Image: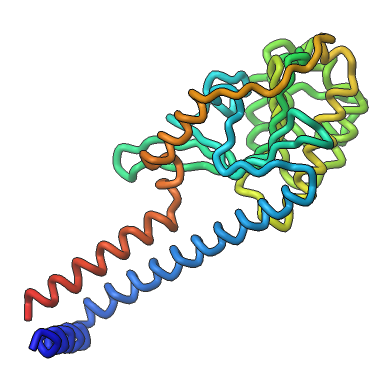
Amino acid sequence: MQSEISADSMRDVYNFIRGNWEYQLLFGVMGAALVIGLIYMLYEWRRRRAIMAMGEGGGLEYHKHPNLGFRLRAAAPALFSLGDYNSVENGLRDVSALPGAWYLDFQYTVRGHKRGGSTYSFGLALYRDERLTLPEFELAPETLLGRAGDLVTKRDMDFPERPGFSGRYALTGPDKQRVAAVFTPEVTGVLEGLRGSWQVQGAGKFLIVFKRGLIAAGAYPAFIEEARTVFRAFLADPRNLAGAPAPAAADNEGEAAQARLYQLTGGAGMGRPAEIALVVAFVGFLLAVLYALLKN
């Protein structure tokens, strides 16, 4: 008897939906959101598996939630201070070619009062070494808007004898003399030869290179090799090193616990549009079916 009632109820729901174009449109939108969300989840799973496999075969240690040994927001590079909170995921720790380097997914989120905030993602390579003594600087692709603004601010540092580098990048920093000394012809030559829109930031014992948007698994090997090339270019200049021995990587359990708490409470992951669409579509689907059952 219960099965007959259930069958009749579902038949009523089906007939109700067929007779109302508003519901057909609603279910179509929710169905599309569900499909997008599932495709995104599958893509993320396959990407994570590919990154793990690449790490196992290339002298890299994979960490789903990396413990970097320091607090991101307490680090010097300007990127780490953006947003209201940030996180790293899918980290590859370099243990052979360039110990001390990490290759990561980095995200920061800006809270919003009306739409829940916005999350920005980057493919990030990070090198941290106690021997480094870099001045604070930021290097980003040159833009027309940036050139126009620099006519007033005069912040961009140009090298007339290296027009290719100066035409491609905007270089800024509070201590222009020290920054100019760091960007030797060898360093600018390496940066000029990079493919894509790279950004570089340095300060103290930190050096990071990054691109906007997460790096596809197939592009990860090239991303790592180019990041290593940039790191080595800066490390090749003895003026950037204080001469102290490089310490072993710190094992900060407190930072690891904070990262786990961040993930449990949502973190940047809940800011991803596809995941939000998947949750909203599923809840909307259940409410729509419940409404149709009660109406009939």
Whether 143 is drawn above or below 234: the answer is below
Instruction: Please identify the quarter of the rendering in which residue 14 is found.
Output: bottom left
> At 55% across and 57% down in the image, what residue appears?
44
Q: Is residue 69 left or right of residue 33?
A: right
Whether 243 is drawn above or below 56: the answer is above
Looking at the rendered structure, the number of numbered marks drawn on it comes to 0
Seen from the viewer's position, the closer of residues 217 and 51 is 51
Quadrant location of the N terminus in the rendered image: bottom left
Instruction: Please identify the quarter of the rendering in which residue 101 is found.
Output: top right
Q: Residue 123, position in %: x, y? A: 64, 43
Seen from the viewer's position, the closer of residues 210 and 173 is 210
Quadrant location of the C terminus in the rendered image: bottom left
Seen from the viewer's position, the closer of residues 58 and 132 is 58
Q: In this view, does 70 lie to the left or right of 23?
A: right
Q: Is residue 172 visible?
A: no
> At 85% across and 23% down in the image, what residue appears?
235
Q: Is residue 182 visible?
A: yes
The chosen color scheme is: rainbow
Q: Residue 110, position in %: x, y? A: 43, 35
Seen from the viewer's position, the closer of residues 293 and 245 is 245
Q: Residue 71, position in %: x, y? A: 54, 23
> At 76% across and 33% down in the image, what residue appears?
169
Instruction: Please identify the quarter of the rendering in which residue 26 is found.
Output: bottom left
Q: Residue 273, position in %: x, y? A: 43, 54
